[in-house]
Every structure is written in C-alpha cells, then in structure tokens.
Amino acid sequence: MKRKFLASLLAVCMALGLLPATARAEVVAGGICGAKGDNLIWELDDSGTLTISGTGEMADYSAGPTNSIWVSSAPWYKELQNIADIKAIKIEEGVTSIGRGAFSGCSSAETVVIPSSVKTVGGAAFADCAFTQLTIPEGVAFINFEAFTDCGGLVRVNIPSTISDIGYDAFGSYWRGALSVTLYYDGNPDDWNKLFLNYSYSSTGAGEYPGEKVYGRKTIKGKEVYFSPEVTRTPDSILASDANPAVTITSDTAFKAGLTPADLQINSSSTGLTPGGLTLSADRKTLTLPFDGQPQAGGQLMITVPNNAFSVPVESGIVLPPVAVTVPEPEPEPEPEPEPLENIDDDDVPLEGADYEEVPQTGDDSRILVFGTIGAAAMGGILALDYMKKRKHNDAE
C-alpha cells in the first residue's frame, strides 16, 4: 500500500512538472514616489507596466514641453534609459492623488488604471500619453489644468458626476493640434455647467481665466459632451378596472421641445391601450403620457425613451421598467359581529367546559346548574354556594 501511494505521488509530481510555468513579471526598476517619501512606491516590470502602490498622496513633479516633447522630473525618468519602456500605468487602490507632471511624456503608455481612491489628478499628469480611451472613476473630484493635454489618440473620456472642477485645457492640445476627444459625463447639464463657472488653472476655481466660461455642449474648446440622464416613471402598475390611465416620466435632463408620442418607443399591444396626447412641464423635465382604452389584465406597457428625445446629446436610449396591468384584489369579507350577551349575574356564569341547562326553582328566582361532565368535587362546591345563596335570601325575608 505504501509503495502504491509513493508511486502515485511521484506520478502527480512528474505530471505537474510537465505543465508550462506561468510567466511572472520581473521588477526591473523601482523606488519611492510619495508626497511623504516612502508612503508610495513605484515599480516597473519587464512587461512595461509601471505600478504605483501604497497609501496617500503622490509627490508633485515639474513638467513641460521641450522641443515638442513633454519631459518630467519624476524618478522613473531618471532611472530608465528609455521612457518608452513604459507601456502601461497602473495606480493601485489606496493612492489618493496623482502628482503634477507625474507621467508627462509617457508617449508609449497605451493604458492607464485609476482607482476610486484617487481624489485629485495633478496638472499635466498625463500630458502626451498614448491611450485612446480613459475612464475616470467615481470619487475623483479635481482634474487640474492640462491633465490630459496632447493625448493625441484620445477619443473617449468617461467623467463621473463626482467631479467638482476641471482645469483649463484639461483635454486640450499644446503641440498636437485639435483633439477629437468626446466626453461622456455621468450627470446632467445643470451640474456640468457648474464646473465651468470659474474655468481656471487652479483646482479650486480661483479664476485665472475668468473669460473662459463655457456652457452646455460648448465645453473645453468645442469638445462634444454626452450626458447620462436619470429617468424614472410612475406608476409601477395600473388596474384593469381603471379606464384611460396615464403614465408620468421624469428626467433630470430636459426633454426636447415639441416632443410627441411618436418620438418615444411605446409597445402597448398586450394592454389594449393606445397612446393619447403628451404634455410637458414648463422645465420640460416631466412628461405625462395618457392612454385611451380599458387596460387588459396581464398585459405590460413597454416604454423606451430614445437618445434623441432629450435636449442635449445622450449616448443611448433609456429602457424603462414595464408597467403591468393588474386585477384589483377583492376586498376581504367583514367578520360577523358577535351576538350580544344577556344581562346575567356573576353567579350565573357557568364554569368553562361544563354542560348545563337552566332549571327554575320553586319559591324563588334561583337557578341551579345541572352538570354532565364535571367531577364530583366541583359539583359539591357549586351546591354549597347555592345553599348559601338560598339561606341569605330566606334570612332577608
């Protein structure tokens, strides 16, 4: 038995030895890069991924364009013989800021990962990088001036609603000419416009460029902005007994003027209803959609608000949850009222569990209980009480 076990173990080890080894990236350079020194470290592996890890803020570095090339004083520029060795930038959870000029000139970096712990992106932090798409996560509040300037291949940027300030020329161009980047903002136009009331270099909106006020779609030097409206509808269901019901749709982004039912995608075939007219509130953020007919139980009213139903660019339509047609639940039958009790003396209340009948007594109004199922001891007690009652009555006479 022992030999068989050892033979089996050896066979497993040999089989595992034949499996291809998983390649593990080797760190080729590294150091510290935190605002407090060693609170953050950086490592570059042999695959070209530059990783920043630790807790807290990153140090700021001087950066700027020189002879059409962005350069920085960040430590990886000093350690590496060729900055083009950096192919990807990964910032790990726990880092709370990206230093000014940190990755300027990383023109071979095609991807960047920014965690939700980051609150601030420093000025020119990613100037002249090579990534084409960028997602800034929920939690980031400040994007400083020229943070992503001269990223010539950048075509799409997703911006969260947590952003409170975008600095001057954050997605602009210094050397590369006009960029064709499109911005997708996870919020509504009113909040977007507030970002640019003090369009400036500073992350606090101090107003170095007070004339650079932009509104709505005309933002960041003509970049197109798409919004993500929040849309809800009421009610959740309608009763089959309610003729000519109506549905209300509310959005935090205004609908376009002159909207009609034909502009919406409505499927009411299973309900027996047909769309009526449509009314918009004064701010065009609430529409009321009445229907004609008697709802059919079990049907579902499906409504989709297409992207061209809004007053601003929206990336995709909004599919609303279906409105179900339900049958009203029958009202529960009322419980019968208890029969009223006759006026009786306490002495006339029978013991629980006793079978009895009323027997009139000669000479007075006394009554006795005739028991059928109680024990002899209980009967003796009742007879004694009846005797005392009679004696009291006779004494009174």
Image: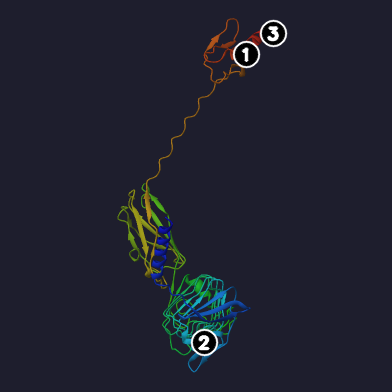
Q: Which of marks 1 and 2 is nearer the N terminus?
A: 2
Instruction: Name the image quarter holding the C terminus.
Output: top right
Determine whether the residue tagged by mark 1 lies in a helix, strand or loop.
helix
Q: Which of marks 2 and 3 is nearer the N terminus?
A: 2
Q: Residue 396 carries which label?
A: 3
Pick the front one: 116 or 351: 116
User: Looking at the rendering, which quadrant does residue 342 occupy?
Assistant: top right
Where does residue 186 sit, x and y in percent of width and height?
A: 47, 70
Distance, label 2 to label 3, CA atoms, is 123 Å
Determine whether the residue tagged by mark 3 lies in a helix, strand or loop.
helix
Residue 259 as seen in the image, left or right of residue 100 = left
Asked if residue 287 shows in the view, the reply is: no
Where does residue 34 sit, x and y in percent of width and height?
A: 60, 79
Label 1: how many Cα within 10 Å (few below 14, some 14–19, many 20+) = few
Q: Which of marks 3 and 1 is nearer the N terminus?
A: 1
Numbered marks: total:
3
Pick the front one: 137 or 21: 21
Instruction: Name the image quarter holding the N terminus.
Output: bottom left
Q: Name the residue under label 1.
A: 381
270 up-or-down from 335: above or below: below
Distance, label 3 to label 1, CA atoms, is 23 Å
Q: Nearer the viewer, mark 1 or mark 2?
A: 2
357 up-or-down from 270: above or below: above
Residue 17 as seen in the image, left or right of residue 203 = left
Q: Name the residue under label 2.
A: 80
Are the residues at dot 3 and dot 1 in contact (C-beta closer than 8 Å)?
no
Please, which residue is most extreme toward the top here?
Answer: 363
Q: Mark 1 belongs to which amino acid? A: Gly
Q: Residue at x 33, y 60 (%)?
A: 266
